[in-house]
Structure formats: C-alpha cells, structure tokens
Amino acid sequence: MNTITPLSNRGRTWFQALADNAQPVNTGLGSVLVADATWRGERVRLLAIVPDPQNRFPRARHGELGLDEGWAIAHHVREAIDADRSGARRPILAIVDVQSQAYGRLEALLGIHMSLAAAADAYATARMAGHPVVALIVGTALSGGLLAHGDQAHRLLALDDPKVVVHAMRKQSAARITRRTVAELDELGKTVIPMSYDVQQFAKLGLLHELITGIDADAPSTAQVAEVKERVAAAIADIRKHPGDLTSRLNNPEARVHRAASIEVRRRLAEQWNA
Amino acid sequence: MHTTHSDNPITKERRDRFLARQSVIEMRARERARAILDPGSFRELLGPFDRLESPWLPLQGIVPESDDGVIVARGLLAGKPAVIMAIEGAFQGGGMGEVSASKIAAALALARGDCERGKPILPVLLLETGGVRLQEANLGEAAVAEIHAEIVALRPLVPVIGVITGMIGCFGGMSIAAGLCSYLVMFRQARLELNGPEVIEQEAGIDELNASDKHLIWGLLGGEQRYETSFADALIEDDVTELRQVIQAQAARGVPARHRSEQVEEYRRRLASIDPADPPDSLALRRIWPKGEMP
C-alpha cells in the first residue's frame, strides 16, 4: 500500500490566481473547480482537479481523476462548447496537478476508462470546434490524469519546478510492472529521455510548447502570476494564428531529434498507403 | 451474438458449429488481420522488412521487433476497403511504444484523409495491450494521446470499430481509446479496464483488489460483464467467422448519433445513482445498468 503524500494545493492555488476572483461555476463536486475568468475582456474557462478529502469515492480523495471527475470535466467543457456554438469560442485552460487516475475495485466495476474517455473526448471536441485549448502543468501530471485532462490541448505548458512531474505511471508501480527497482528506473531516466520523471528532460521531447522558468509554483507572487497568465495568453494567440491538431508536437526542433521515429513512421506510412 | 447457455441445449448443430470454430485468440496479430480481411486482399504497411523498430528498447538491453508489435494492414472486408490496426500482445504485452502507437495514429489519420476525399475505408482496431509501454513512457503516452485525437476526428466520418479479443485484454491509455470507439466488440476471454489489476493492487493494496483472483477480475472487467453493463456493444465467441460477421454488422449500423463517450448526462445520472458506501457487486450492476439501454 502506498504511503499518502501530503495533499497538493497547487491546482487550487493556480486556479484561484488565474481566475481573478471570477465566480466559480457550481460543479457539485469539491474536487472539480470551474470558472470563467475574464482576461482582457475575454472569457477563459478554467478547469482544475483538486484534492477533496470528503470525496464520496474514497479512492479519489487525493486529487486523483476519478469516476465523477472525468464525467464532470466532460460536462463543463461541453457546456462551453454548446454555449459558444454561435459566437466567439472561449479559450479553455486545463490547470494540471493530477495524482493520476483513481485506482480501485469500484472504479473498475463502474468503468473509469469511460470517464476518462469522456473527458479526453470533450477537450478534443472543443479543440476541433475552434476553442483554443491550453494545458498548464503546475504539479504532477501522471498517467491517465494527463491523458484525460491536458493531453488533448492544442498546447502544453509547464512550470519548471522540481515537483512538476510528467509520466505514464507512478514510479513504484512502474517499477513493479517492469520488474525493476525504483533506483534502476531513476538511473535509466538519465539516459533514456522518455523514461525520465524530470520536467527538464520531458521538455526535450518536443511535446511542450513552453517550459516557464523562475516561478514559485507553490506560492507565486503577483508578478509571477501575471507572467504565467501572459505566457498562457501568448499560447492562446499562437493557437488562433496556427490552429489545427496535435501536429505542433511533431513540427519543432526538439521533436525532430527525440521524436524522429514518430515522424519517420508518419512519412513512410503515408508513402505506402496508396502504393 | 450473445446467447444464454441455459436456454440452449447442446444440439448436434451447436456442437458442429463449435467444432468448426477457428480461434482468433490463438492467432498472432498478423494472422488475425489476414483472417479478418477477404482472402487475398491483405496488404501490410510498414511491415517487418521496413525495419521500423523502437529506438528506445535497445538502450535498455531489450531486443526490439521489426514491426514494433503493431500490424497495419489494408484490404477488403466483404468487398469494401478496410484498414486493420492489430496490436501484438506477445511482444512487450502489447505495450504501446513510440513506433507502435505512432503506426496506429498515422493509419487513423490517413483513413480520415481518405474518408474526407470521399473514399470511405473502415477502421478496425484489435486492442490487445497493457497500455503505454513503460520503457518508452512519455513518448508512448504522447502517441497514445494522438490515437485518442485521431479516433475523435475520424469517427464522425466512419464508424471506428474496436475489438478486444483476449487473453491480455485492453488496459491503460488504450482502454480510453476503446471508450472512444464508435462500437466495441469483446470476446468472453477479454478484459477492459483503465487500470491493470496488478496496478490496482500495488496502488490500493491487496484488500482493495487481489490481482491473482481470476474469478473476481473477470467478474469486474471481463467481456461478458462489460457487455451486460453496456460498456461494449457485442459479445462474441472466439471464432474468426463470427468476428468477421460482427464487425460487418457493427459497421452497418453507421455512425452513431452520439458516441458512448458523448453520452455525458446519461452516464452522470447512472453514476449519481450509485452509493459508494453501499456499492453494487458485479451481478447487481447488471440489473441497474442493463445492456441495450445505451448508446
């Protein structure tokens, strides 16, 4: 059984900082924060998953993406899509500090994969409907947590901070599944870049639009909040200039080095498709 | 399609049909793709002779395979163009690496291009995977996210059919892909879940879930349970002919008005009716979330 680390406040901290006192939308859940902030006269929908010690599902009390959370994200993203159908598409910002997905027997029985699918679907649908979608990683972004809440964004941004961790699985579990020790995993992460738990290594893969440095991720100053907001606004402007799908994660100098195989697969499969 | 055994005595006809069955589970991914497509129509893309291997496994002393565990094959199904994307469960547990996941994402994108140009092609995913290949962690996950994006972009144009055969099942990020498919076909031997039983046991403890309790695991995640609680659209026996027929039958339903992952309010209502302090067991869930009610 894993030891429970102290609950992270980063999701809430950044949600409140970036929401600018906007009235939160009532989600009916303590774990899902939603608000429409007004940035320079434009509405931006913010969504965050935060720890809720009272969560009705015990396995989702530490900031995990659980059954209720995935479906709630889907609901509130689609609410913005439906409301903006005939008007300006508001940008959508996923604030990411997610302790992976909730692991439990009840989660298995009730189909937590569908809850995450619904969230990923909603973000992808928003992206295709013309909403600029940005994910800002301020803490942990583990596994299904990021797949459902962030990975479908046009652009991924992250704070350069030692506690910002992007990975497919928590270290202890990854060690068990790959029959390795945690120390071995750490050692491998130094040479095999996609296996690293370090966000600076992650930034080399070409998946990040920007790694934002010099920010206190736990207690940002007013100037630091303004700086991060500026970077997100710049990403939104960039999306409006160059919309499209997720290919910006392949068309950049870092990806040409560390995702060369991804690019090669696409090139050669296209050659052979009609051959 | 699914029948209840109790009201079906073993007749000679049933016995003959059973004996004539050709197992899909016993086939490797390439044979599966070949068997689903019309005879003589199978054409593999990025096959082993293209030697597109994982650049990351050799760095860890793991021998790569020259198709990286995914078969992409074009051909005909009942005379109509189809593309089969089949994951090889025998290589790295079907784990999705940079190359293998990119092959699927790229094939889905090319299928979309064809559909947009008025050349419909039926995409079929054979999902036999433990999820993201942890030896390529972040790049596997990135490409799996691209698979999700491509399924959502393609499925308004043509139904995307997912098939989970077993014995590995479909887990992790690829269970999300299964949840995004237009229609999902499961074998009785198959399992579908976000979290592998071993990971649940590791994260939540053995009291939460004993990963070696096969009866419990299949009761939660098995094909029959997923079908009976409307997480899958068809439950079939392990037989090639039946699989070919059911893929055609699902495709003939056309693009659904709303995909399963778009039925947000229905699932929220269902979930709201559950009391986690007094949860249903597998059989009780079949009564309160019956099949056929959705989509």
Image: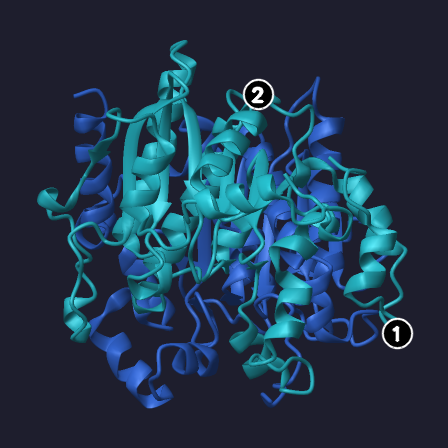
Chain colours: A blue, B cyan
- For residue B68, side relative to residue B251 (left or right): left
For mark 2, does the 10 Å Cα neighbourhood hold few (<14), some (14 to 19), or many (20 or more) residues? few
Q: Is residue A55 visible?
A: yes
Mark identifier at residue B252: 2
A174 relative position to A113: left or right: left
In the figure, residue B47 lies in which quadrant? top left
In this rendering, the answer to whether B139 lies above or below B114 is below
The chain letter under disc 2 is: B
Q: Left or right? Give the position of A79 relative to B234.
A: right
Q: Looking at the figure, which quarter contains the N terminus of chain B?
A: top right
Query: Looking at the picture, how far across and down is residue B141, in whole percent?
Result: 40, 56
Which amino acid, mark 1? Ala
User: Of the residues shown, which amino acid type is indicated by label 2?
Assistant: Ala
Q: Residue A223 lies in what quarter of the image?
A: bottom right
The answer to whether B28 is drawn above or below residue A52 in the figure is above
Q: Which image quarter: residue A44?
A: top right
**Disc 1 on helix, strand or loop?**
loop
Q: Nearer the viewer, residue A156 or B175?
A: B175
The extreme top residue here reads: B118
Q: Residue B277: which disc?
A: 1
